[in-house]
Amino acid sequence: MLMQIKNITKKYQRHDGAINAIDNISLDISEGSFVTITGASGSGKTTLLLILGGLLLPSSGKMFYNGKEINLLNENELASFRSNHVGFVMQSFALVPYLTAVENVMIALNVKNGDKTRNRKRAIELLQWVGLDDRNTHYPKELSAGQQQRVAIARALANKPDLLLADEPTGNLDPGLSDEILKILSGLNKEQKTTVVMVTHSPAAAEYGNVKIQLRLGGLVEHTVLENMVVS
């Protein structure tokens, strides 16, 4: 089992009292699965994703990664966990506007390895994998929204993560571009066996998952595991 969360709760204190953004959720995530998380706005989807990525710590409960209880890690240890195991893809792309596509990917590589020649070669390979080998020297403003998200995916793959977390990766894209991005994520899952956990509001996007989770008011209301699922 790649990840296990047991009785996770995340409380936020407000002026009118505490609110449970995540309310006593237990969940196993198998290695190589494609998990989709759906639910209405405010249901806790993004909070759960951030907890899985070690960017938020739960208020109570336990979380394990390959058997290690990561909610007990300090800030430096959590940063190492994210650097070595987790890739993030966000709805906003979060590209640096004054850097080219290849330089945006190299940001993630330079953190771990100062060999710029080697890092550039790796970045070009990643851009080629997402179908942007002819856009290496383009700046974000010269790329379409779908192309910018491809750069963001390439950057997320720089550290060869076991776990890719995607928060509404198609939220800013039209249906055609959304399908392209989803097929890239699906290919990553099937070809490289990377575990993908994706938050989405789109029923069509949710169909790409072989594990489907639905949240309501911070609680888990549906958990479906599909076997031998193939999305064309």
Image: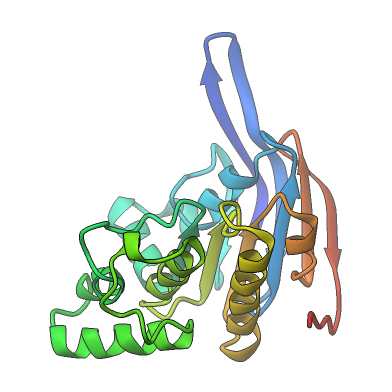
Q: Is residue 92 above or below residue 229?
A: above
- Please give the name of the residue rendered at 54% of the width and 26% of the height, measured from the top-left corner: 12
Residue 100 horizontal/vertical position (percent): 25, 70
In the image: residue 42, left or right of residue 64: right
- Near-viewer residue (63 or 36): 36
The image quarter in which residue 5 lies:
bottom right
- Near-viewer residue (90 or 66): 90
- Please give the name of the residue rendered at 60% of the width and 75% of the height, measured from the top-left corner: 185
- Please give the name of the residue rendered at 34% of the width and 51% of the height, measured from the top-left corner: 74
The image quarter in which residue 200 lies:
bottom right
In the image: residue 211, left or right of residue 42: right
Residue with the most extreme top position = 16
- Please give the name of the residue rendered at 48% of the width and 81% of the height, measured from the top-left corner: 130
The image quarter in which residue 44 lies:
top right
In the image: residue 112, left or right of residue 187: left
Q: In which quadrant will I find the C terminus?
A: bottom right
Q: In which quadrant will I find the N terminus?
A: bottom right
Q: Is residue 56 above or below residue 111?
A: above
Would residue 29 be seen by someone viewing this image from the given angle? no
Residue 184 horizontal/vertical position (percent): 59, 78
